[in-house]
Amino acid sequence: AIDLRKLRKETGYITFDEGYGNTGSCKSNITFIDGEKGILRYRGIPIEQLAEQSTFLCSAYLIIYGELPTETQLNAFRSKVAGAARLHENFRHHFEGFPSKAHPMAVLSSMLNSLGCYYPEMSSNNREQDLELFDDAAALLISKVRTIAAMTYRMSLGLPFNFPRKDMRYVENFLHMMFTEPYDEYEVSQEVADALDLFLLLHADHEQNCSTSTVRMVASGGANLFASVSAGVGALWGPLHGGANSAVVRMLEEIHASGDDGSRFIMAAKNGKARLMGFGHRVYKNYDPRAKIFGEAAERVLKALGREDPLLDIAHHLEQAALKDDYFIERKLYPNVDFYSGIVLKAIGIPVEMFTVMFAIGRMPGWIANWKEIAETSNKIHRPRQIYTGYTKRDYVPMADRG
Ligand code: ACO
């Protein structure tokens, strides 16, 4: 292997890898992906086994602490998370400060950073101290990110906020905070709870994606967990990353409204006039295993709810057409996790503008585990170089001479 650091010191050369497609930015033992074969494993355990046998909180524990929890450990983790769900009363003032049309991702990012202000002892930017209180901070973030999301939704509609309940499990509690109305408690169906739990589990980590790399970048400078995950939310927001799940549903709705079955859209994508959202991936050059699991979950949840969604038919048609088309075959473009997830969220009743927030709730354990890994193992600040393309050198021009 070439020692790049030595090479740089001796020659001044740097490697140029736009978008880091071929750059390993760290060593990590959290999540494994083989993009050619379509394999994803959390701490060595295949995603298919976790999807079938685990829950979001159990997988979160696995991702953060490296081992599947015993029953006692899982119960302790669950009650720590359940006990941390309430927000400080003063948070109301933060929410009231936002315009009613504020995007929930902007609210979430600000609120996560603000949260750190309520726990200065956990967000000291002193690694030793932040790590000492890590267990509390991790449970708190996994719990409160869900409360913040529900509160953002209720506030955006001008509805009263529902307090979290200690007797409810993670997903049920979230659905209660979102949808219970005064005098009309939201009844959580098992199918809906299972589908949402699966959604969160499948999003829980995905090695060095854009938002997780952002979290690690911020953490590498020594910043605390709250500031690091808040930055992760900003990175997740974009349509090429977490924003793709809402973009897929908007795309499917547009196709439906136009009367197209998807064929015209495929042509537009091939001609570079549109992008088939929910298709393609930087790492997967095969089927994203999460898309496969979700495609089946979408069928299941719609059936259980006794609903039909024409968007699912369009999605199937787009997928079948793309899988047979040379443009997509040559570029190895397959459905990614976002292709079917929006249909599942829509069926559950989550509004489209909240989809990426749901992704953030799911990704929280992965961000936390990556922050911990950096804090425990590395003191090296992340600091990439660049290829400078500007002027070599020129003199300052006084205002009077600038024309
Ligand atoms: N529709 C049509 N063409 C596409 C698509 C797509 N969705 N994705 C890639 N291509 C084409 C590109 O135009 C390019 O073609 P060319 O070689 O003729 O120029 C080729 O495939 C390679 O594409 P890149 O953009 O270079 O691939 P990259 O690895 O940089 O991007 C990405 C990956 C961002 C996911 C891309 O496939 C995309 O934009 N997909 C749609 C958005 C999406 O679904 N994002 C979610 C990703 S998963 C996640 O973050 C959870």
Image (cartoon, rainbow, N blue to C red):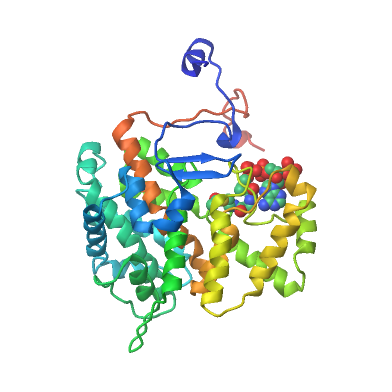
Using the image as rendered, state which of residue 186 and residue 55 is in the foreground. 55
Q: Position of residue 329 (x, y in %)?
A: 74, 46
Which quadrant of the figure has residue 394?
Answer: top right
Residue 367 shown left or right of residue 101 in the figure: left
For the C terminus, give its image quadrant: top right
| Residue found 35% across the figure and 74% down from its top | 177
Q: Residue furthest bottom?
A: 183
| Residue found 57% across the figure and 23% down from its top | 15
Using the image as rendered, state which of residue 301 and residue 213 is in the foreground. 301
Residue 308 shown left or right of residue 58 in the figure: right
Q: Position of residue 121 (x, y in %)?
A: 19, 48
Using the image as rendered, state which of residue 219 and residue 146 is in the foreground. 146
Vertical comparison of 259 with 209: above or below: below
Residue 122 shown left or right of residue 372 in the figure: left
The answer, for residue 1, to whether it is visible in the render is: yes
Vertical comparison of 225 with 139: above or below: above
Vertical comparison of 16 with 211: above or below: above
